[in-house]
Amino acid sequence: MKRRHFLSSFAAAAVTCPLIGCAPCSHQDDDQPAGTNQTDKSAAGGTPDKSQVDYSQKKKLVIYFSLTGNTRHVAEHTAKLLGSEIFEIVPTVPYPTEYDVVVKQAKEEQDRDFRPEIVSLCDRLPDAEVVFLGSPCWWGTVAMPVMTFLERSDFAGKVIVPFMTHGGSKFGRTLADLDRFCPKADRLKGLTVWADDVPQSDPQVQQWLASLGMITADA
Ligand SMILES: Cc1cc2nc3c(=O)[nH]c(=O)nc-3n(C[C@H](O)[C@H](O)[C@H](O)COP(=O)(O)O)c2cc1C
């Protein structure tokens, strides 16, 4: 099946947007086995070897934002397999439902570094040791409500495991942005799922969690 690429659909805007220009050229390879990803902070920063850590016993939490349901699907399946709690980031003012309108609005918000208000922060976050953080790719990085959430929450000492649904950019600039927003958090290898593949992504999610040692392979 031929996939529609977000960036080709919005090529005109991409030309005028220096930020998005780098999104599809990212070398952050999310298809490698766990632990070999060069974007993993342990590989780059010399933190303890995560293969020695037993994540199965750590307290986990799934936090996500989703506009059209793709990221919600991955988030809910992740939480189900982990047996963890799940929290949705909800903007106080809902985004428009018309695709072209929200794409334009998001671009404008990103250009002025806008932070939309969100309904609440997550009161279960302080207890969590491993946070699975999901967002749709919006103009090459996490959606703005996720940025609001990250800036207003304390991730120090936690492990962040990112996941993203997208229309071709994979993580784009997300991993670098997460490290910027949460400099005191560690980060494990994330998962990206193309929007069209979301309905069939459950086995991929299971494989990813098993590869990180979060669940057993036959969970
Ligand atoms: C405002 C907006 C911006 C987007 N920007 C990108 C992008 O830069 N790169 C990309 O691959 N897909 C982009 N997409 C496509 C979404 O990432 C994709 O459809 C995603 O699966 C939507 O997730 P959701 O259903 O959880 O909202 C964008 C979609 C929207 C609505």
Image (cartoon, rainbow, N blue to C red):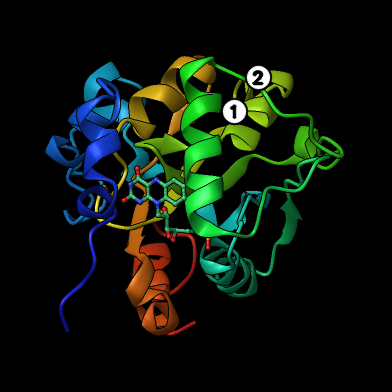
Residue 3 vs 158, above or below: the answer is below
SS at circle 1: helix
Q: Is residue 113 left or right of residue 125?
A: left
Q: Is residue 134 visible?
A: no
Q: Is residue 203 left or right of residue 155?
A: left
> Quarter holding the N terminus?
bottom left
Distance from the alpha carbon under mark 1 to that under mark 2: 6 Å
For this rendering, which residue is in front, 56 or 143? 143
Q: Which residue is mark 1?
A: 147
Task: Mark 2: give few (<14), some (14-19) or many (20+) Cα within 10 Å.
Answer: few
Task: Mark 1: give few (<14), some (14-19) or many (20+) Cα within 10 Å.
Answer: some
For this rendering, which residue is in front, 144 or 193? 144
Q: Is residue 26 left or right of residue 62?
A: left
The picture places residue 69, in percent across and down from the top left corner, at 59, 68
Q: Is residue 129 visible?
A: yes
The picture places residue 102, in percent across and down from the top left corner, at 55, 47
Q: What's the residue type where badge 2 is placed?
A: Glu
Q: Which residue is mark 2?
A: 151
Residue 39 vs 218, above or below: the answer is above
The residue drawn where x is 19% and y is 38% is: 28
Q: What's the residue type where badge 1 is placed?
A: Met
The picture places residue 24, in percent across and down from the top left corner, at 18, 41
The picture places residue 78, in percent across and down from the top left corner, at 55, 67
Could you say which quadrant of the image residue 168 lies in? bottom left
SS at circle 2: helix
The residue drawn where x is 63% and y is 51% is: 64
